Amino acid sequence: MDDGYAVSAPLSLEVSGLRYTYPDGHEALTGVDLRIAQGERVALLGPNGAGKTTLVLHLNGILRGSAGSVRVGGLPVVPENYVEIRRRVGIVFQDPDDQLFMPTVAEDVAFGPANLGLRGAELAARVDEALEAVGMSQYRDRAPHHLSFGQRRRVAVATVLAMRPEILVLDEPSSNLDPASRRELATILRGLPVTLLMVTHDLPYALELCHRSVVMDQGRIVADAPTRQLLADTDLLARHRLELPYGFAPIQLPQ
């Protein structure tokens, strides 16, 4: 399996030699190299404990590596750049309730841009744009906790889109969604004009949304290839504790 998938410039994300050790001595990243071009949609796969979340938390400076570097759109992820980096990298957490805390949907979506100093018509336009992108405009005055789980996840995506990020990072976006909500979210994500990094155990969803997939295990990248090719490698999947649903054969699906 190819572990050096070639991408063309310009790059949205460049990770070089990244290492990170937690205070208890556990080395979570052991020299990660990853390049993602603007507009790519990439799935980040791997078993629990592989280092996926640790890697994601380096993309906007929540964690800082002991060695190596991270650049977003050419800008180094260092403390003096954190305000701009955190605008450029939007992370949507697995539980939307971690991101929704205002009285109404519109206020939740406005929160980030307002913190950047946007006001008045410009702020209202950001909110309208983000809600329209996720198909939630009609719910702008609703309380988030009155929405379905799938609707709350879409609003969580809107709160990040309102910042106009360069990279949208999604943590298990299909988890706990019913089939209709899963399909609706996939349609939304396919239409977004951003670079997408999707952390997921849902291998069919990775195939549906991401042409390219990266597998992490034990703190390093062990495979980087077109998703269809990667999911057809049963030995690779077994070595890294990744499983397709029973009867799912990616090689037989239409291109």
Image: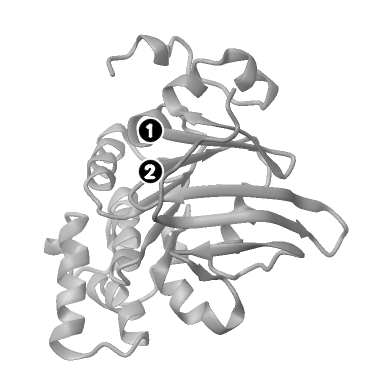
Element at label 1:
loop
Give residue 78's quadrant in the image: bottom right
Q: Is residue 176 above or below residue 17?
A: above
Residue 26 at x, y percent in the picture: 83, 53
Q: Residue 197: image x %, image y %?
A: 44, 48
Please tell me whether residue 120 is drawn above or below residue 84 in the rendered image.
below
Quadrant of the rendering where the N terminus is positioned: top right
Residue drawn 34% across the image and 30% down it: 208
**Nearer-the-camera pick, 192 or 242:** 192
Identified by mark 1, the residue type is: His
Q: Are marks 1 and 2 in contact (CB under 8 Å)?
A: yes
Image x and y of residue 92, in percent:
43, 58
Report the residue at 70% width, 42% height from top.
220
Q: Residue at x 25, y 54 (%)?
A: 193
Q: Residue lying at the far right in this picture: please name it.
A: 25
The residue wearing badge 2 is 41
- Where is residue 205 shown, x and y percent of the image? 39, 32
Q: Residue at x 69, y 22 (%)?
A: 239
Residue 49 seen in the figure:
no
Marking on residue 55: none
Q: Amino acid at mark 2?
A: Arg
Secondary structure at numbered mark 2? strand
Residue to which mark 1 is pinned: 211
Classify mark 2: residues with Cα within 10 Å, few (<14), some (14-19) or many (20+): many
